[in-house]
Image (spheres, coloured by chain):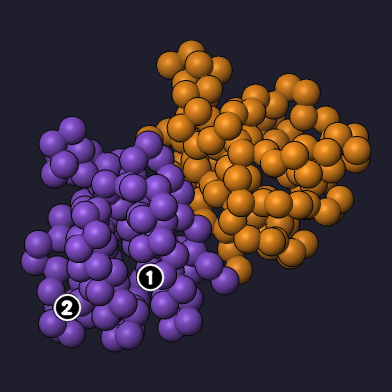
Chain colours: A purple, B orange
Amino acid sequence: MRIPILKLNNYLLISIQTEIDDQTAIQFQEDLLDEIYKTESSGVVIDLTSVDIIDSFIAKVLGDVVTMSDLMGAKVVLTGIQPAVAMTLIDLGINMKNVPTALDLEQGLLKLHKELGV
Amino acid sequence: MRIPILKLNNYLLISIQTEIDDQTAIQFQEDLLDEIYKTESSGVVIDLTSVDIIDSFIAKVLGDVVTMSDLMGAKVVLTGIQPAVAMTLIDLGINMKNVPTALDLEQGLLKLHKELGV
């Protein structure tokens, strides 16, 4: 399966709502970078509200995708990070220090507006 | 698999991006109606941009989901309907006469704003 990527104005919205396996995660990474390139999006919101738990591989892919998007010029905001997910990310030393986060999709979009100064 | 449903303010956004099988379609119908109820959303945008072709069963489910959402008080806007999909819907006599449509997600949201007068 593929994780749907929605384009809204010059942002991309992604809501991860299922347990994703390694293959899906890799596919998502590719798809998202392709979409950023194709749509020339300046911002991305990845909503993790429905993700209860993540394993080390998915956490790494997520960390990578943030860094890669940044390299391509798109700012990523992560939203809806649950306690267990926050703990996994920190335990694994995934560096999310410079990644803006927000409570939900609306707050995430507001944050992007602020970050990008538009 | 389940089709992710994103909540943005008092709207729900859905982008159908894969070929969906009958089971996924039924699950989507249930999930969407549940979400409308839970989130008290007043509008729904279903984006079909990535759907090249639909079969009669999926077309029927789609027609039903629009009517059901309407019954529950949520206005549905369909966006990105491709030629082949439009033909299938009409050929099958699926009544989309009163369903507002739009080119893409942004236009769909604008249309919802207009329809709902907010």
Query: Which residue appears at 13% of the width and 82% of the height?
Result: A93
Residues at marks 2 and 1 on the same chain: yes
Q: The disc labelled 1 sits on which kind of residue?
A: Gln
Residue B100 locus on image (x, y percent): 65, 25
- Quadrant where the image shows the N terminus of chain B: bottom right
- Label 2 sits on a secondary structure element that is loop
Query: In this picture, is B7 found above or below A25?
Result: above
Along the line of sight, the residue nearer the viewer: B31 or A59 = A59
Label 2 belongs to which residue?
Answer: A94
Q: Residues within 10 Å of mark 2 (few under 14, many from 20)?
A: some
Q: Is residue B97 visible?
A: yes
Is A84 on the left-hand or right-hand side of A1?
Answer: left
Query: Which residue appears at 35% of the width and 55% of the height?
Result: A36
Residue A78 locus on image (x, y percent): 25, 58
Is A75 on the left-hand or right-hand side of B50?
Answer: left
Label 1 belongs to which residue?
Answer: A29
Q: The disc labelled 2 sits on which kind of residue?
A: Ile
Is B91 on the left-hand or right-hand side of B50?
Answer: right
Q: Earlier in the sequence, mark 2 or mark 1?
A: 1
